[in-house]
Image: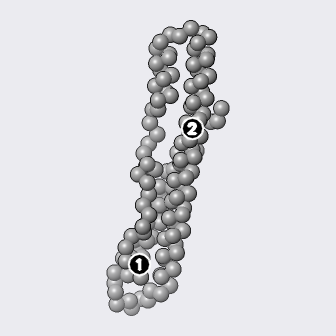
């Protein structure tokens, strides 16, 4: 029976909340600078493009994190095949704890994947 926790752990980045980024701070700085109309339009257009690229980069990273968690779940499911060999009269009671740990790993990986998928969906629209 499997004696340790699954070898993959969720990335700590998956749980980080989205924070005010550089582009938003640049927009505020431009707003405060009081640029003229032509320059302001060009700056806004450039920031819109950067914002869309950053959203795409973030969405790509979030999807990669969700896929990594899916792959970890698949790995743990393979380890759970040992559950079929576990009998109620198993003399090594730690085997039951190992099974519980594997199920907890699945729950943890699924929770991190859900956060990543929600973050991907919460990012701005493509421009």
Query: Quick check: 71 above or below 27?
Result: below
Answer yes or no: is residue 126 visible: yes
Name the spot of residue 83 as percent of width and height, x first: 47, 81
Display coloring: one colour
Query: Quick check: 69 above or below 102?
Result: above
Residue drawn 49% across the image and 27% down it: 24
Q: In the picture provided, is 15 more to the left or to the right than 93?
A: right
Q: Give the SS element for disc 1.
A: loop
Which mark sits nearer the N-terminus, 1 or 2? 1
Query: In terms of depth relative to the viewer, which is nearer, 33 or 114?
Result: 33
Q: Mark 1 Cα within 10 Å, few/some/many (few <14, many 20+)?
A: some
Residue drawn 61% across the image and 16% down it: 41
Answer yes or no: is residue 118 visible: no
Residue identified by numbered label 1: 2
Q: Give the SS element for disc 2.
A: helix
Q: Residue reaching furthest right?
A: 127
Which mark identifies residue 68? none
Residue identified by numbered label 2: 55
Q: Mark 2 Cα within 10 Å, few/some/many (few <14, many 20+)?
A: some
Residue drawn 42% across the image and 61% down it: 9
**The C terminus lies in which quarter of the figure?**
top right
Query: Quick check: 77 above or below 108?
Result: below
């Amino acid at each position: 029976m499997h004696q340790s926790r699954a070898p993959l752990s969720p990335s700590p980045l998956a749980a980080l909340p989205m924070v005010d980024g550089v582009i938003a701070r640049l927009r505020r700085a431009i707003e405060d600078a009081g640029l003229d109309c032509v320059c302001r339009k060009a700056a806004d257009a450039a920031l819109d493009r950067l914002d869309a690229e950053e959203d795409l980069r973030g969405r790509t990273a979030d999807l990669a994190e969700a896929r990594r968690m899916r792959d970890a779940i698949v790995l743990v499911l393979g380890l759970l095949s040992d559950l079929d060999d576990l009998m109620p009269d198993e003399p090594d009671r730690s085997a039951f704890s190992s099974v519980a740990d594997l199920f907890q790993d699945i729950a943890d990986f699924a929770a991190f994947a859900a956060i990543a998928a929600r973050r991907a969906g919460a990012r701005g629209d493509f421009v």
